[in-house]
Amino acid sequence: MHASEAWLQSILRVAPVGIGVTRNRVVLEVNDTLCRLTGYPREDLIGRNARLLYFSDEDYEWVGREKYRQIAERGTGTVEVRWRRRDGAAIVVILSSTLLDAANPAQGITFTALDITERKQAEERLRLSEARYRAIVEGQTDLVCRCLPDGTLTFVNPAYCRYFGSSPDKLLGANFASLIPETDRADAMARVLGRDTAHPLDSQEHPVVRADGELRWVQWRNQTILDTTNGLMEIQSVGRDVTEQRAMEAELRRLATTDPLTGAFNRRHLLTVLESEIERARRHGRSLALILFDLDHFKQINDTRGHDQGDRVLQAVAAQVRGRLRRSDVFTRWGGEEFLILAPETTGADAVALAETLRAALRELPGSDGGPVTASFGVAAYRPKETLDRWLKRVDERMYASKRQGRDRVSGDESGVDASP
């Protein structure tokens, strides 16, 4: 008997959970762990009613009813409840009880108390964190989605659904590739699905197609979501519509590089392009030519018909010329009534022929005096090792040669070519 009691006492001392014995809910025995758990010394617990551990009579009575109900049904009773420590702090415990003697309930019960306060606090922090995350994600106007490494959508926020005119039921489980135009799909997929532990972040812009067929541009920031072993679980993307922004940027670029009256490129843009085209011609031995033309007697139009009429003539000239040039040709309003054309992959002879075509096309336009619009053309092919200033000077000289020779003609310096009507 003494050995049995000693064995029991040793278990009580080393047990990692609080252990006690009650009869009629009066504490008869407790172990050291329960004392540490509640902050009460042993002498303050023994002989006291367990009510001192509860915050309210309601909690105390509910635990008694619930535990004894469970014990009556299955022999043990387990509840989760708040206890009040001696210092007034609250702890959450899982309280498990069973009869000391199943044949004689009057002998009392033994119970264990497992402190789960930290676990409950961690769960609450996680719950609040998830709630805050969901509130932020679901309440914001940015598009938020998550997908598996193969592109299958696993989460979409309300803004994403509204933007694409669809519902979570239709989007979740589908692949986001279906929302991207086929021409851009492969590149966009590669950028998103290329995220891994070594490349966790990426930003990109690509077009998307909404439910009504409208094509829009979205800027995305993609980020990896890793598991506990740093394996790729999902990719989260946050998107923002940049369609208007892109249109504005394109318009600003257009305004910075084009002449507002004629729509031709401006002088600054051509000088930038000339540098790169000269370098390409030097490196690869490519042909390159300039065509400069000046409208004949244009000052008379402004003086006799007014600048509005002069502007209309300039616009008509630009439209007539632009319609006869290649996409690779750079058509520029060089200044006033002067226009300059950079023709890549074009020899001097071919440039002269093109200039003749343009001269004839301008004559189809009605002038201010009822006659045709005419212009004097100069042509100069690029010469290796020639400076840009010298090249521009040569083409200008050829254009003025046409003026001196009677206007409405083409003068080229390749093989002494002078073309005239």
Image (spheres, rainbow, N blue to C red):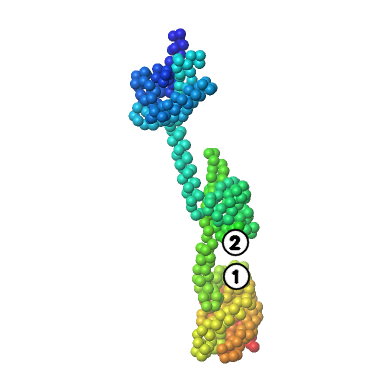
Mark 2 Cα-neighbour bin, 10 Å: few <14, some 14–19, many ≥20: few
Q: Circle 1 is placed at which residue position?
A: 281
Residue 159's disc number: none
Could you tell me if residue 401 is visible in this image? no
The x and y percentages for residue 138 are: 50, 49
Relative to 145, is 42 on the left or the right? left
* Amino acid type at image mark 1: Ala
Q: Earlier in the sequence, mark 2 or mark 1?
A: 2
The residue most toward the top is 1
Q: Secondary structure at mark 1?
A: helix
Cα–Cα gap, marks 2 and 1:
42 Å
Instruction: Name which quarter of the figure residue 294 lies in.
Output: bottom right
Nearer to the camera, 298 or 23? 23
Give the residue drawn at x 50%, y 87%.
Answer: 306
Give the residue drawn at x 51%, y 66%.
Answer: 248
The x and y percentages for residue 405 are: 59, 90
* Amino acid type at image mark 2: Glu
- Relative to 65, is 176 above or below? below
Mark 2 vs 1: CB contact within 8 A: no
The x and y percentages for residue 410 are: 61, 84
Give the residue drawn at x 34%, y 21%.
Answer: 44
